[in-house]
Image (spheres, helix red, strand yellow):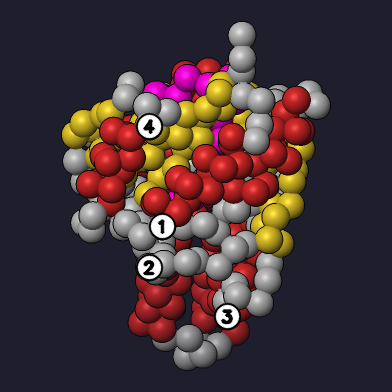
Amino acid sequence: MQKIISIIVPVHNEEKNIPLIKAELSDVLAALPYSHEIIFVNDGSTDNSEQIIESLTKSDARIKSIEFSRNFGHQAAIEAGIKYSTGDAVIMMDGDFQHPPQIIPKLIEKWIGGYDVVNSKRIDNKDISFFKRITSTIFYKLLNSISDIKLESGSADFRLLDKKVIDELKLLTEKQKFYRGLVMWVGFRSTIVEYEVCKRLHGKSSYTFKKMLTLAREGLTSFSMLPMKFIFLIGILLLTAGTFSLSLMLFIKYFIDYDYFSGSAILAMFIVVNNGFVILLMGIISLYQITMFKEIQNRPNFIIKNKSNF
């Protein structure tokens, strides 16, 4: 039987880009000896994205749509696409043209060559802001230094996954999903294809700095327990240093010069240092409490308003 390629395209307010990326994907896929399905996941768009996707599904049965009831986020959109994909291989990519469809044949070529995971790596160009470039570098270096997984700097949610990898991802029940890390965590044979970021044709990115921080936090708390271990180390260091300093101050006060340190100075310094570390440790713990809270809630990561062509 002919192999099927599933393309997952999360979109949020991409009304002008959707017809263009559908046309380009169709052209690229038509030149390949595979069947295909294109799954648009509309992540709560407030423009005409829903109507445009609906018209595409009516004109082509290979175009499928998943409409969220509101904006649930990029990772939730990927999860929904994965859940309903049927392909022997699944390719996930953004709907803003910054993930070039022309790279798809290269991804498939690596897959046919025996790789189960074909990741992509962004080649930075002059259109990428210095701020985004430096924050991305810092994030990947930090994550790689404190976690058990290793991610390439510049990696993105533009990749091909074999069906057996998709099947494993479907079994993961955690609510806070960071797919760049999860794909590396499940293992399998992987490789990388480099690509140059294309310029966005229409609209502006809805991936705000706040959303980038959220993604970074989820990635760090999902794949590293070092901050929690760091709490224990700080506690040991604080107890040791605090005990030594307080003992030294008391020794000077009572055996060398009683007036050198006042009682209030000793108490004030103890309170300031202690409270500072307590607040810091509570802040670190709160990151994990957020994750635990989401797991305990057990709410779905998305709600589908309707589906087409499934």
| Residue assigned mark 4 | 60
The reply to whether the C-beta atoms of the residues labelled 2 and 1 are less than 8 Å apart is: yes
Residue underneath mark 1: 17
Question: Pointer 3: residues within 10 angstroms few (<14), some, or many (20+)?
Answer: some
Under mark 4, the amino acid is: Asp
SS of the residue under disc 3: helix
On the image, numbered disc 3 is attached to which residue? 252
Q: Earlier in the sequence, mark 3 or mark 1?
A: 1
Residue depicted at 61% across the width and 18% down the height: 3
Q: Is residue 38 above or below residue 102?
A: above
Q: Residue furthest top?
A: 1
> How far is the residue under mark 4 from the one under mark 3?
85 Å
Kind of residue sitting beneath label 2: Gly
What residue sits right under mark 2 in the picture?
203
Which contiguous range is marked in magenta? 81-95
Q: Are marks 1 and 4 in contact (CB under 8 Å)?
A: no
Locate residue 190: give its quadrant: top right
Q: Earlier in the sequence, mark 2 or mark 1?
A: 1
Q: Are marks 3 and 1 in contact (CB under 8 Å)?
A: no
- Of the numbered discs 2 and 3, the one sitting upstream in the chain is 2
**Residue 162 is covered by the magenta coloring:** no
Residue 1 x %, y %? 61, 9
Q: Is residue 123 left or right of residue 268?
A: right
